[in-house]
Image (spheres, grey):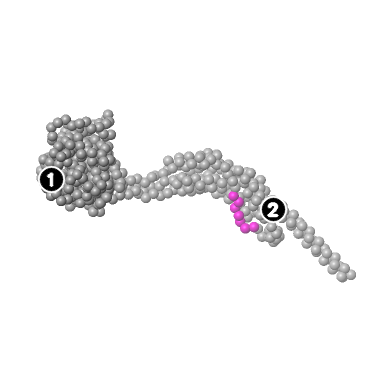
Amino acid sequence: MPRAWNRWLSRGVVLLLVGFLIWQFALFQQELQRIPRTWTVAGLAVGGRSTEEALDAVERALAAPLRVQYQDHTLMLDPADVEARLDRSKSRELLRQALSERQRPGAFLQFLFRQPPPHRDLPVEIQASPEKIRLWLLEVARRFDEPPVEPQPDLERFTFTPGRPGHVLNISRSAERLQAALAQAAPREVALVVDEKPAPPLSLSALGRFFEAYLSSFDGTAGIFIKDLRHGETWMHNGDLPFSGVGVMRLPVALAVARARDLIHDEARRQTVFRMLTDETALPALDTLLGDLGEGDPAKGAERVTAFLRELGLVNSFMAWPFDQPGTPPAVVTPANNRPDLRTHPDPRQQTTPEDLGVLLEMLRQCAQEGGPLLLVSEGTVQPEECQFILEAMTQDRLLDPQGRPTLLAAGLPPGIAFARRPGWTNETRADAGIVLAGRAEYVLVVFLHRPILMEWEQAVRMMRDLSRITSQFFLGTPSE
């Protein structure tokens, strides 16, 4: 009797165990159709719900406004404004794929021992308009961006106010973040990517703004060319406007002589060129050199100067006639003087532009350093030693005011700075052009000032001194007194 009882008891236990396992497996199968309680969908807690119930909850959450942070500014984005909505079909497939991964042998054992699956956040798919997201971000940038500010001219203190740092919205990275946040049911917030920008350094464009502000009260016409010879940056104001070339056109005469004649061994010719470049009253020296170029005919010599300028690509500069020679010069039409709004009344005998003259000065410096277009065009007839001689001669120009002080552009330079210059003037136009050779910086500065009938000398001196002073402060770091 006891043995039979034991058999029946054993069979009953087995049947109960099998029934329990079948019951648990049925519960497990039902559980597989629902989101585990330890899982979230798009950040939203929807554990225990079916796929459709979870998608319903997520869809409602995704329709709520998104809290968007731009630094300290908070904005609310309605998903409808960017056509953002849940893609139920693709999202349903993602959820079903994740749930199907639970159908493995070990998962039933975890269920039996009430071990929940590890936490997992399931993504969903949304549809949104990239273009509308971009437009929304552009409007945010327009409202809240504070771009960095370059140093600004301070005319009262004759210096520059420091630049200011800023911040700008990174549109591309913020669009990626916004797209991802729109697909998150919780939390409904996102911080945009804002790039901090340092204060810009002092640049040549800032110097140009200073010039423009300074010239705003000038009732004449100014032409300016600046070139940083170390970094290659250029700034111009009316750089292509023609001006009378008297005085400054002695430089191309010297270079034409160097090409056609020997300036290295012919001491007499060297002295004539030196006088022409350093003495404003040395018109006989200029006539002598033009006659030398023209085989005794100064007018022919002037033509050869113009031809040389054309070879160098300086199409807006010419010498049609010697300045102090009688006769009618031939009409020379250039891109610069062939314009209806010509207001500088350039001399028909000799003309140039700030840009042409500035480029020629740069060529001179390059030639002295054994490079540049002058050596290429001349094919060996101009030597670096000749360019260096012309450059050094120009540093010896000692145009002084009645008190013996430097004048025009030289007045704005600190003491001891080498300035290879070529000034020139008529009653209506005052000009000065040169290369500042300061060791730590080298730059070309060309200034023309024109006023009909009379450009007062005192005003021209003051303006050129001021413009040269702020330029030297920009390049050299210390203002001249």
Task: Tell me the kind of residue under disc 2.
Answer: Leu
Q: Residue at x 63, y 55 (%)?
A: 38
Mark carried by residue 391: none
Mark carried by residue 32: 2
Q: Residue furthest front?
A: 295
Image check: 200 left or right of 6? Answer: left
Disc 2: CA contacts within 10 A as few (<14), some (14-19) or many (>=20): some
Magenta residue span:
117-123
Q: Residue furthest right?
A: 1
Point out the tag, 2 or 1, that comes first from the N-terminus.
2
Image check: 181 left or right of 326? Answer: right
Of residues 22 and 437, the one nearer the viewer is 437
Reading the image, the residue beneath label 1 is 272
Q: Residue at x 22, y 50 (%)?
A: 383
- Does residue 327 appear in the picture of this structure? yes
**Which quadrant of the structure image shows residue 103?**
bottom right
Q: Residue at x 31, y 44 (%)?
A: 205
